[in-house]
Image (cartoon, helix red, strand yellow):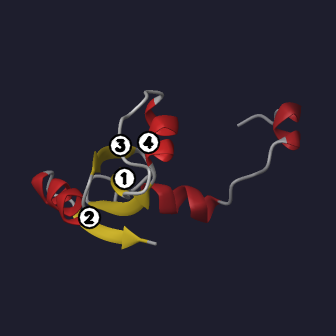
Amino acid sequence: MTSNNNNARLPQVPESEINLASLGLGEVAYVRKVTPRDVERMTGQKIFADPAKPLYCLYMADGTPMAVSDSREAAVANAFEHDLAAISVH
């Protein structure tokens, strides 16, 4: 691999974090509470939801959003439908 001087200005991601991002890919997903505004930022689309009510996003192990639900239980069920073990992230 050759060295690129432009990379010297970029923060370097430790190898352990790169491995962590791929750990469980296709096997593990996580659920996190999000706001309607968070969902709009993720999707780039306006959504119509009560800003006072939480939403729950199911993410793949590498952080890719998979689905948004209006309950934690629905998000976990979505993970099981895709044969993924779901964990909660606070």
In the rendered structure, find residue 42 and report the number of the disc placed on it.
none
Label 2 sits on residue: 72
Q: Quadrant of residue 23?
A: bottom left
Which residue is more in the foreground, 52 or 11?
52
- Whether residue 23 is visible: no
Mark 1: secondary structure: strand
Three-letter code, disc 4:
Val
Q: Is residue 5 left or right of residue 29?
A: right
In the rendered structure, find residue 49 and report the number of the disc placed on it.
3
Mark 3: secondary structure: loop
Pointer 1 or 3: first along the chain:
3
Label 1 sits on residue: 59
Residue at image position (48%, 28%) is: 44
Three-letter code, disc 1:
Tyr
Pointer 3 or 2: first along the chain:
3
Could you give the CA–CA distance between mark 2 and mark 4, rounded to whole angstroms?
15 Å
- Whether residue 1 is visible: yes
Could you give the CA–CA distance between mark 4 and mark 1, rounded to whole angstroms?
12 Å
